[in-house]
Structure formats: C-alpha cells, structure tokens
Image (cartoon, rainbow, N blue to C red):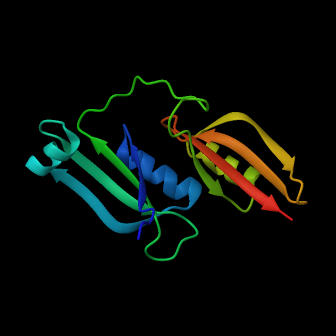
Amino acid sequence: MNRFVHTNLIAKDVPAMIAFYKNALGCSSIGQTRDLNGAWVDRLTGIPNAHIFGEHLALPGYVDGGPTLEIFGYDTVISDMAVSIKTVGFSHIAFAVDNVEETLNQVLASGGGLIGEVVNAAYPDGRVATFVYVTDPEGNILELQSWCS
C-alpha cells in the first residue's frame, strides 16, 4: 500500500514559518519536533555534518494520521533560487478554505504576499470556484480556493 505522508518545506526562519502556517492557514502542532544530526543524516542528505530541525504540522481538514507539512531548517540554507508560479517542479501547495478573501487577509496580516488577483471561475458542471495565489513570508507559493455549487 502506498499513501501520501508529508510535504517538506525548508525555511530560513523555522519558528516564524511554523507560526505563519498555524496562524494564517490553521495548521496545528502534533508534537513531532525534530533535531536531527549524525552519520545517518549525513548519509541520507549527502551533506557532511548536516543538522536538520523543525516540526511536523497537521494540515487542516484531516483527522489523526493525515498528511503533514514538515517545516524544517538546516544550519545553513541556499536561498538565492528564484521561485515563480511557472517554475519547473513543485509549484505550490493548495488549501481549500471557507472564504478566500478572509483567508487572504489572514495571510497578508501574517506576513504573506499576493500574486495576481482573486478570481472567480465558472465550471461546466455549474460549480463556481474562487482562487488566489499568495506567498508565505519566505516567498513559497500557496493557492487558496473555495468551491460553491
């Protein structure tokens, strides 16, 4: 059996990013903090003297045992890579929310940013979706979405 377990986000400021995802998007602590180093971590990462630290957060909308957002840091990180909505590779993490505009305001108040505009899109099956792309405080891209019948 295969199942999705977590998404990892490497942060420059781990405590600030944990606070953002809790405050702006409703993630919660599950008591799984990490402070990892040693030969096995070096072998796993291919980084000599690697030190990984951070926390797993429960994603909103899941019961116990759902996938987590793993916010980790290293003693030194590479932060000069440009991120864009059209960058090859993983582009964004999406959150279904009750109200896109309210959540957008929470994201902005918590240090996030706005990409583009809030849009409404009508689908052939009669549903209407509201979407917006935002960033967390370190520039990682998030999608906020809400669906109505």
Q: Residue at x 67, y 50 (%)?
A: 144
- Percent across and percent down for residue 74 are 26, 40
Image quadrant where residue 3 sits: bottom left
Q: Looking at the figure, which quarter contains the C terminus?
A: bottom right
Q: Residue at x 50, y 53 (%)?
A: 21
Taking the image as drawn, is residue 81 in sight?
yes
- Percent across and percent down for residue 32 are 31, 65
Image quadrant where residue 85 sits: top right
Q: Please, is residue 17 above or below residue 116 in the view?
A: below
Q: Please, is residue 121 above or below residue 60 in the view?
A: above
Q: Looking at the figure, which quarter contains the N terminus?
A: bottom left
Q: Please tell me which residue lies in front, 88 or 32.
A: 88
129 left or right of 40 in image: right
Taking the image as drawn, is residue 38 in sight?
no
- Percent across and percent down for residue 10 are 37, 42
39 left or right of 60 in image: left
Q: Residue at x 25, y 57 (%)?
A: 34
Q: How many marks do you count on the picture?
A: 0
Q: Please tell me which residue lies in front, 31 or 85.
A: 85
Q: Please tell me which residue lies in front, 23 or 121.
A: 121
- Percent across and percent down for residue 54 are 31, 52
